[in-house]
Amino acid sequence: MRDPYKVLGVDKNTSQADLKKTYRKLAMKLHPDQNPGDEKVAEQFKEVSAAYALLSDEKMKARYDRGEINPDGSEKGFAGYRQHAGAGGNPFGGGGFGGAFGAGFDAEDLFSSLFGGGRARGGRPKMKKRGEDKSYRISINFLDAVLGSTQKIKLESGKTLNIKTPVNVKEGQQIRLKGQGRPGANGGPAGDALIEVHIKKHPYFTQQGNDIHMDLPITLEEAVMGAKITVPTVSGKIALTVPKNSSSGKTMRLKGKGATDSKSKKTGDQLVKLMIQLPTDTDKELEKTVKKWSTKKKSDNANSIRGHLD
């Protein structure tokens, strides 16, 4: 048998807690239940378990460190366990160590004691295995994403659940339902259901961070003369005052009418961009009025809005 420190990949100063963690990790990887039919891995599992059995016993570890015993637990100067102990003897007082995994040592018993597994009749313990996670996808409306909602989902098992989507849920965000995944094996826990959220586009709202954006069409008269307009927000309609002589593209801020941050609980704003909408049909009266108004101020107006482009 090789040096137990090299087998486990640890040094003499490794604590018993870290030694146990290392063994658990290697044993889970090399266990025969995880590698059915692989004799080479099965031998590695036994070697790792024997190395841990020696080093986890502080008296045996001390004797090995002093050079009194071999890596397989046999006394120095003797060929091995059977030669030293004779037929049926045990030089370690029932500790279960033996040269070349001799009589009394059982890697499965050691593994079972560490991992709390029961021993299957006539063979090795059955490992508890957690069930796989199961992924689902739901599509929700924009307002439901901003305000939170309850959605129904049918699981692979046939069970239907009502799940709550959080306030201000984001595109692609996952909601985890503990224990609603696929069942575990040998009494292991079930996996989780992972619900991925996708948000449908809204006809006029968009979201940037916690702020809600929208374009608001207004008439030429409303832009020139000013007006009070009913505007939708995510929490209901409000009255917005459009100032006189408002240009197309002017953005107005509605404080506290955005989405609420789930962590800070702060609420964003709604940003309303004014968009002047001219009549779709030709309006001779409008053309005549604009032409009359612009004749005297044509060059001055052009310079005031485009002079910076020269």
Image (spheres, helix red, strand yellow):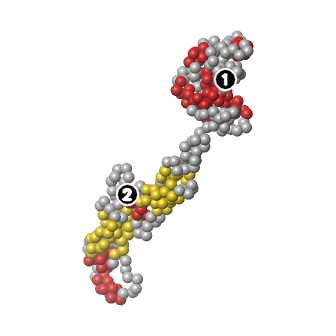
Q: Residue at x 55, y 53 (%)?
A: 135
Q: Residue at x 62, y 15 (%)?
A: 93
Instruction: For marks 2 and 1, give the CA distance.
Output: 64 Å
Nearest to the observer: residue 272 or residue 298: 272
Where does residue 143 sit, x and y in percent of width and height?
A: 40, 63
Q: Residue at x 70, y 10 (%)?
A: 77
Quarter-of-image position of residue 268: bottom left
Which label's residue is closer to the chain start, 2 or 1?
1
Q: Nearer the viewer, mark 2 or mark 1?
A: 1
Q: Is residue 140 left or right of residue 69?
A: left
Q: SS of the residue at dot 1?
A: loop
Q: Which residue extends farthest front?
A: 121
Q: Is residue 271 visible?
A: no
Q: Amino acid at mark 2?
A: Asn
Where does residue 297 sit, x and y in percent of width and height?
A: 29, 79
User: Split into 4 quadrants, where in the image is the N terminus?
Assistant: top right
> Which residue corresponds to mark 2?
210
Where does residue 301 sit, x and y in percent of width and height?
A: 31, 75
Q: Residue at x 46, y 60 (%)?
A: 151
User: Looking at the rendered structure, which numbered label has been put on residue 105?
Assistant: 1
Where does residue 43 sit, x and y in percent of width and height?
A: 70, 30
User: Split into 4 quadrants, where in the image is the C terminus?
Assistant: bottom left
Residues packed near mark 2 inside 10 Å, few (<14), some (14 to 19) or many (20 plus): many
User: Looking at the rendered structure, which numbered label has been put on residue 34?
Assistant: none
Q: SS of the residue at dot 2?
A: loop
Residues packed near mark 1 inside 10 Å, few (<14), some (14 to 19) or many (20 plus): many
Quarter-of-image position of residue 272: bottom left
Q: Amino acid at mark 1?
A: Phe
Nearest to the observer: residue 253 or residue 289: 253
Q: Is 310 drawn above or below residue 138 in the view shown?
A: below
Mark 2 touching mark 1, by CB under 8 A?
no
